[in-house]
Amino acid sequence: MSKEETVSGRDLGGLRAIEENPLAGCIDFHLHSGPDNVPRLLNDIQVAQKAREMGMRGVNLYNHQVPTHDRAYIARQVVSGIEVFGGVALNYPIGGINPAAVEMALKFSGDCMRYVKMPSQSAAHHIAHKAHEKGKKWDGSGLRIYDSSGKILPEVRKILKMIAKADIAVLTGHISPEEDVALVKAAKEEGVRKIVITHAMNATQRVPMDLMKQMVKMGAFIEHCFLNLYQKQVTIEQYAKAIKELGADHTILSTDLGQGLNPVPTEGLKEFILILMKQGINRAEIDLMTKKNPARLLGLETF
């Protein structure tokens, strides 16, 4: 490789190659689309169309209020040539930590059900954090995955057993870092193979590095989202450092985009990839975090 092709050890040839088509074969594991109870930039069909136009392999639809696996199936009927998946978030609108909701979702036709997300906007940790942000006192409301003694709730265990049998992913949602660790331990005990620590470094979660390392050792994947970078909750240097410490083989990159005033998800993922490469994250690592790892979590490739 010539001197012109490297700067500070970075492979500029690899950077040029990925700049030509940075999203080819990528999967956005975490994005939001309409319809929703808040403004969304694109609907399910438009998200799938945009991803296909950019040469992506797939998208995974999120919603805090309602399931998305059925919506993913409809999107597939309209937009061919793109993998579209969804799942269930265990928030109050579907009955909270509700085994019946998970059981029914797994029975749906279409084979698009790929994750169960622990409480997000209904999590006690999330509600407490939002109250603190507004300078208010937390009223003690919200869902937890364990009781006051730290024992995992029976309904959580039941759901984890269903997740293991279906071989789909469990996502931590917006529960506390301490609950994250407890959930990973319980998931492994119940035979769950696919575990994702949802946007671990965002302003609500702030999972300490020692806990991220502990969960990675247990087989969990750490998710980094472009939205948190865009909102200046995390710096690109912090993300790059975390990737190097935790390993790209235990990391996924997502956007968490779709909000009305934020960038289109495809543009966000493109920018995320390019600026991480400028931080010294190489092409092979990018491919692991945007292609291979998400594909494994979605059942498109084997572990």
Image (tube, rainbow, N blue to C red):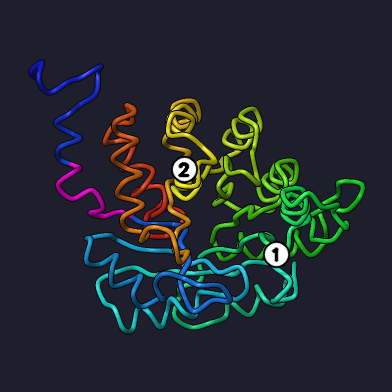
In terms of image quadrants, where is residue 200?
top right
Q: Which residues are magenta?
A: 18-26
Q: Is residue 16 above or below residue 195?
A: above
Write down the residue under mark 2.
Answer: 229
Write down the residue under mark 1.
Answer: 159
Does residue 71 appear to the left or right of 104 in the view shown?
left
* The N terminus: image quadrant: top left
Q: Which residue is painted at 23% across and 54% down in the image?
A: 24
| Mark 1 neighbour density, 10 Å: few (under 14) some (14–19) many (20 or more) | many
Q: Position of residue 258 (x, y in %)?
A: 44, 64
Q: Which residue is painted at 45% across and 32% down in the image?
A: 243
Does residue 247 appear to the left or right of 22 in the view shown?
right
Residue type at mark 2 is Leu
User: Distance between the Cα atoms at labels 2 and 1?
Assistant: 32 Å
Q: Which residue is painted at 57% across and 80% down in the image?
A: 107
Q: Position of residue 198 (x, y in %)?
A: 57, 50
Foreground of the two, 102 or 175:
175
Residue type at mark 1 is Ile
Q: Is residue 156 magenta?
A: no
